[in-house]
Amino acid sequence: MPWLIWAVPLAVLLALAAVVAVRTWRFRPPAEEAVSPAEIPYDAQKAIDDLQRMVRCATISRYDPAHEDDTAFARFRALLPELFPRVHQSLSFEQVGRRGLLYRWRGRSQDRPVVLMAHYDVVPVEESHWTQPPFAGVIADGCLWGRGALDTKPTVNGILQAAETLLGRGFVPQQDIYLAFGGNEEIMGQDAPDMIAWFSARNIRPALVVDEGGAVVEHVFPGVRQPCAVIGTGEKGVMQLTMTAKTNGGHASAPPRVSSIGRLSRACLRVETHPLKRRLTAPVAGLFDTLGRHSSSLYRVIFANLWLFAGLLDLICKQKGGELNALMRTTVAWTQASGSSQTNVMPALAKMGANLRLVPGDSCADVLARLEKIVRDPQLQLEASGCQEPSPLSVTGNHDGWLKVRQAVRAIWPEALVSPYLMIACSDSRHYSRICDQVYRFSAMALTDELRKTIHGNDERIPLDAIGKAVAFYLELMLRC
């Protein structure tokens, strides 16, 4: 009968709609108990003053050691005993590697030690582009200005202020706490690997590692209005790609049909218009599940039914680009191009360079092979360098380390939604995944989009109240260790 032709598809659609509706209705935030902060008093003004002095040390790390100012690093290291006398009287200290600073705070037990990390080196600056001098430690407009004011001297300061405060109260942690500060993180230096070797040689396997990474942010997740405290449970990998075109060169008055620059440009466009395939990793699935439950109606439908709408979400990500897209796939950012030194000379050698960030599940070798298929030009040579594979992913759920970090966050930022997150940048903490399965990345600050853009950029600065919040977070975390 003719009506059956329409009845069957209609029944399927109605059943599908019912499934979507029920899953969306069930996709609600779980009930959570409030976490009461310990509210340990600390000296907020000292925290500001000490960070100001740290920022005034121009600890710029560079890939060429000959261009580094060793005196600035030495000045920073000499400053710490002056600012934190209890830490240096009570904790054992060892310099590991070239600039690594490692403190051991003995606890009641040593079987499940904790490592709290940060780095005190910073990236170079273009001083002429700054509103305030980058190493003067100026306080203006309610902020402390300077390179390193966010990345990551406030973390160094927060950890040491918290330890200094608790030592003054006679606190002894349940477990050993190691304070590990690197001096060459910004150039992917050896301090962190040297510290891993130090731990491994002594058969020390941390139960928890906390480093920089996520933060308390707003307006970053579709349809969510509340602040979100995102904690990195893994990192993307990184790879540098060079694409080269070689020709005989020649005079620009008689160019070939397709120039080397044109050939490179075509390949670049093909890569940009054919994004690498999506991968829904555990941290991103956790992010969607946690924050999606607090999203607006339309987005709740999508995130509650990714089995059906993953393709739609992927299309939105590819069209918009940006951070959400970067969470979903390996990204290729073309950042460099070179050719002839003169406009009237055809280059014999032309190059384009890209920075790739690899999503967990992809490898450097596989990504390079896929790009060669996308480019489809035998006259172009693709070469990968500086490859670091994606980090292993840390556990969440009811695991002890995750719960400690999560509770400390909720104690300081009770209004924030706490979620796992995939860190799209790189940090020293990736090395610790070799000896610990609970490595979490959280910069203990609430940061606006404007402030986040100043990290590695111009006018880096931190609100004064955020300096104290970092101290309060580490007090809460240490009390749980």
Image (spheres, rainbow, N blue to C red):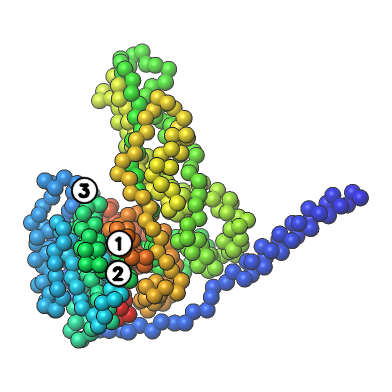
- The quarter in which the C terminus is drawn is bottom left
Q: Residue at x 86, y 52 (%)?
A: 4
Q: Amino acid at mark 3?
A: Glu
Residue 70 visible in rendering:
yes
Q: Quadrant of residue 476?
A: bottom left
Q: Residues within 10 Å of mark 3 (few under 14, many from 20)?
A: few
Q: Residue at x 30, y 61 (%)?
A: 432
Q: Residue at x 29, y 68 (%)?
A: 205
Q: Amino acid at mark 2?
A: Pro
Indicate the secondary structure of the residue bearing disc 1: helix
* Residue to which mark 2 is pinned: 206
Q: Could you give the CA–CA distance between mark 3 and mark 1, rounded to whole angstroms? A: 33 Å
Describe residue 362's horizontal placement relative to residue 440 as left or right.
Answer: right
First in sequence: mark 3 vs mark 2? 3
Indicate the secondary structure of the residue bearing disc 3: loop
* Residue to which mark 1 is pinned: 432
First in sequence: mark 1 vs mark 2? 2
Q: Could you give the CA–CA distance between mark 1 and mark 2, rounded to whole angstroms? A: 9 Å
Disc assigned to residue 126: 3
Indicate the secondary structure of the residue bearing disc 2: loop
Q: Quadrant of residue 120?
A: bottom left
- Determine contact: label 1, label 2, CB under 8 Å: yes
3 vs 1, front mark: 1
| Vertical arrangement, residue 467 with respect to residue 257, above or below | below
Q: Residues within 10 Å of mark 1 (few under 14, many from 20)?
A: many
Residue 409 visible in rendering:
no
The x, y position of residue 140, in whole percent, is 22, 65
